[in-house]
Amino acid sequence: MVLTCPVAMGRTTTRRDEPSPLSRRTVLRAGALLALGGAAAPLTGCGLFDREDPPTPDPLAPLVEESLRLAAGLRAAATAHPDLSARLVPLAEAHEAHATELTRVIGTPAPSGTATPTASPSSGPPADQATTLTALRKAERAGRDTATQACAAAPAERAALLGSIAAARATHLEALR
Amino acid sequence: MSERVMSAPTSPDDALAGALTAEYAAIWAYGPIGVRLTGTQRKAAVEAEAAHRTRRDALVVQLSNSGGTVPPDRAGYTLPFPVTDKASALRLAVEVEERTAAFWRAALPASTGAERDRALAALVEYAVRATRWRREAGITPLTVPFPGRPG
């Protein structure tokens, strides 16, 4: 940790020895800055404590969250409109199955809990059926587009799963008409 | 589950040849389907058949250009069950769309770029069409969790 400091200190020293037009205050201020830099350097510059490879999130991780969010939105709508639940619950189950399968492919534990809070932030009076269905369709359309892009960018071993997810979301859009 | 089986390395031409044989069978099947339907359902069958013909033609051109083998069409195909009325015609239409979707899904790992985009467009289109036929046939649920996935 101390290793970075002598360089900075040395530079300060030589500069101070030169006949310099700098006022004492300027030099002191510079010294204070260098001291700060010296304190920060061991954390950022030394590399001693840097992680070799900072864990990069899997590109499919957002899709897991999106799946759970779509599922939660459908379940919330099914609760608010019980007469729609026969239509909505199978769609929610499909999204949950997607999240499970994506998580398996990513190879990390599933995000803890369900996405219920993010999916139903509005605690106002429940929207009427038409408004609810419109919102659900909009979410499925966006989800279809996300999965389509993910499929296009995916390595071969993930392409089929992502294709199925894109297709499933497109069929949901149709089923919500 | 059967994911690994489907993801087994297949050459792009083999995958497309598989899709082409599926398209042949789909076009053939819409013959007996169409005659059992009327009105908007028959119109939907005609449109579906046209979509399969368009993809068939594109595949024949693509496989010819790439030097791959173009599998021949057959004089007839065995239907999974007899089509005797509107109900069985609609059920067959669901089956046809879901089966062809599966072949296009299998083409996804074997393709990249624009070719993968086309395979995905086919998978999505046929999956959506299957859902429409399910609705017409009164089948619930209207959707399957993993369109095109076998088993």
Image (cartoon, rainbow, N blue to C red):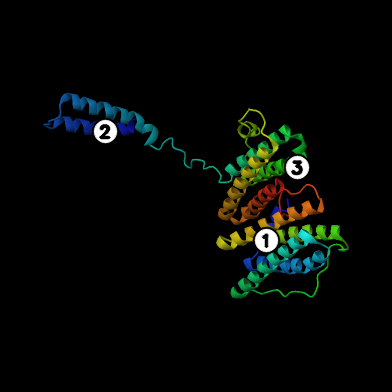
| Amino acid, disc 1 | Trp
Q: Mark 2 lies on which chain?
A: A
Residue identifier under label 3:
A87
Q: Mark 1 lies on which chain?
A: B
Q: Nearer the viewer, residue B151 or A48?
A: B151
Q: Could you give the CA–CA distance between mark 2 and mark 1, rounded to whole angstroms?
A: 64 Å
| Amino acid, disc 3 | Arg
Q: Marks 2 and 1: same chain?
A: no
Residue B38, picture quadrant: bottom right
Residue identifier under label 2:
A8
| Amino acid, disc 2 | Ala
Residue identifier under label 1:
B104
Q: Could you give the CA–CA distance between mark 3 and mark 2, rounded to whole angstroms?
A: 69 Å
- Numbered disc in front, either 1 or 3: 3
> Pointer 3: residues within 10 angstroms few (<14), some, or many (20+)?
some
Q: Position of residue A134 (x, y in %)?
A: 65, 42
Question: Residue at the spot x=74%, y=57% of the render?
Answer: B98
**Residue B121 vs residue B96: left or right?**
left
Residue B9, picture quadrant: bottom right
Q: Marks 3 and 2: same chain?
A: yes
**Residue A119 vs residue B2: left or right?**
left
Q: In which quarter of the image is the N terminus of chain A?
A: top left
